Image: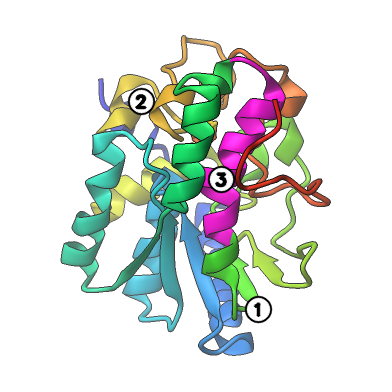
Amino acid sequence: MSAITLYARRTDGFEARLARTVAALQAAAEQHPGRVVQSTSLGAEDMVLTDLIARHKLPIDIGTLETGKLHAETSALIPRIVERYGVTVEVYRPVAESVVHFVRKHGEKAMYESIDLRKNCCAIRKLEPLSRMLAGRDAWITGLRREQSNNRGDVPLSEIDDKGRTKFNPLAEWTWNDVWHYIATNDVPYNPLHDEFMPSIGCAPCTRAIAVGEDFRAGRWWWEDEKAKECGLHVKDQPAVSMIGATA
Ligand code: SF4
């Protein structure tokens, strides 16, 4: 059964939430001309935001992290966005030398061995490339929603990150039903893995399908405690992590 069939529902207040999202995107573009980027994970929420940015012709750049560990279905969305919307997608990859060194020292399955190694893998494949995406920019846009997890329960519509940049979370108040209602009514392209019970999709080794009744992010780093389950992209006050020769 498709994600649209399962989740797309129009619920009370949707139009008002959509209007606030569009207003937040317009404010981001107006307040940070030429210096704001949507950091897209290519997940359902981010596809909604990319559609809105393109639909309203907002001068907001679009960037993504190609970690080298994405599912083929996820990577395939990059050319689909370009084709569908006629926009450029900036693709940021990890430093090859850092990846080779880490894998040589810790192996391809290091992320399962300890939280430190998993976080070091995320630092090399996600955090360092994100820092390049955000360099020279003073605002970014994410698809975070309060409903996604307890850790995200108080996500504001905008905030200041630990580098002083404005971080817009225009979907903060959206429900999962809202996301799929928008996708269904606007024919937004989406990752077919969402049809296979993967609501939250990250790198292939760190994502699995969820069972009925499990939490939204239960399929991400499922072997770890709930509190550890962030890759660091949206966590303030990150400890310094070496990019090469990660700690064991
Ligand atoms: S999500 Fe997994 S594979 Fe991707 S960077 Fe983090 S630990 Fe590495």
Image x and y of residue 52, in percent: 40, 67
Q: Identify the mark at residue 85; answer none if there is no mark.
A: none
From the viewer's perspective, is 160 left or right of 11? right
Image x and y of residue 96, in percent: 42, 49
Residue type at mark 1? Asp
Q: Please name the colour scheme applied to the rendered image.
A: rainbow
**In the image, is the residue at mark 2 within 8 Å of ligand 1 by its beta carbon?**
no
Label pair 2/3, CB-CB below 8 angstroms:
no
Q: Quadrant of the N terminus?
A: top left
Q: Which residue is mark 3?
A: 124
Which secondary structure type mostly characterizes the magenta part of the structure? helix
Q: Which residue is mark 2?
A: 6
Does the magenta portion include 150? no
Task: Quote the CA–CA distance across marks 2 and 1.
Answer: 38 Å
Q: Which residue is mark 1?
A: 138
| Residue 60 seen by the camera | yes
For this rendering, which residue is in front, 102 or 217?
102
Does the magenta portion include 122? yes
| Residue stretch rendered in magenta on the structure | 113-130
Between discs 2 and 1, the one toward the N terminus: 2
For this rendering, which residue is in front, 145 or 204?
204
Residue type at mark 2? Leu
Residue 158 higher or lower than 198, as above or below: below
- Mark 1 Cα shell of 10 Å, populated few (<14), some (14-19), many (≥20): some
Image x and y of residue 239, in percent: 81, 46
Task: Quote the CA–CA distance across marks 2 and 3.
Answer: 36 Å
Residue at 29% x, 51% y is 185
Task: Quote the CA–CA distance across marks 3 and 1.
Answer: 22 Å
Image x and y of residue 113, in percent: 61, 15
